[in-house]
Image (cartoon, helix red, strand yellow):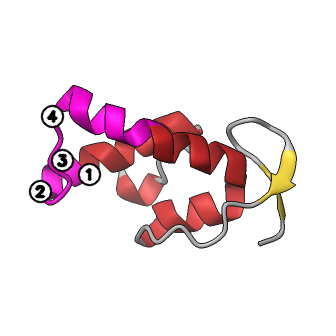
Amino acid sequence: MGLVRCARCGNEREGAGKVGLPGSLGEDIEARICAECWREWLSTQIRVINHYGLRPAQREDRDKLYELTREFLQLAVPVSEV
């Protein structure tokens, strides 16, 4: 993990490192999100899952969770995924 200019907080901090998410979302987080903002999302995502009644094992709910992850972390949706 190196330093990144975080897309969410704008600070230069230690990066999130390997986050284990697939595709461009995982790559974007690893390259553009600091560890502190990533930890904040991890503690928030359970509330988000419960609030929206998401079932991450279901493809459409997982896609919604990924969309909410991008919004929270202020990562634009890649043109290829629109």
Q: Position of residue 58 (x, y in %)?
A: 11, 56
CA–CA distance in space, label 3 to label 4: 9 Å
Q: Residue at x 70, y 43 (%)?
A: 7
Q: Residues within 10 Å of mark 3 (few under 14, many from 20)?
A: some
Q: Residue at x 59, y 48 (%)?
A: 39
Q: Amino acid at mark 1?
A: Asp
Q: Residues within 10 Å of mark 2 (few under 14, many from 20)?
A: few
| Image side of residue 63 versus residue 2, left or right | left
| Image side of residue 30 versus residue 4, left or right | left
Q: Magenta region: which residues?
A: 44-62
Residue assigned mark 1: 63
Task: Name the secondary structure under disc 3.
Answer: helix
Q: Quadrant of residue 74?
A: top right
Residue assigned mark 3: 61
Q: Earlier in the sequence, mark 3 or mark 4?
A: 4
Q: Quadrant of residue 1?
A: bottom right
* Callout in the foreground (2, 1): 2
Task: Name the secondary structure under disc 4.
Answer: loop
CA–CA distance in space, label 3 to label 2: 5 Å
Q: Residues within 10 Å of mark 4 (few under 14, many from 20)?
A: few
- Pointer 1 and pointer 4: residues touching (CB < 8 Å)? no
Q: Position of residue 61 (x, y in %)?
A: 18, 47
CA–CA distance in space, label 1 to label 4: 13 Å
- Pointer 3 and pointer 2: residues touching (CB < 8 Å)? yes
Residue assigned mark 4: 53
CA–CA distance in space, label 4 to label 2: 11 Å
- In this view, the residue in front, 19 or 43, is 43
Task: Name the secondary structure under disc 1.
Answer: helix
Looking at the image, residue 26 lies above or below residue 74: below
Residue assigned mark 2: 58
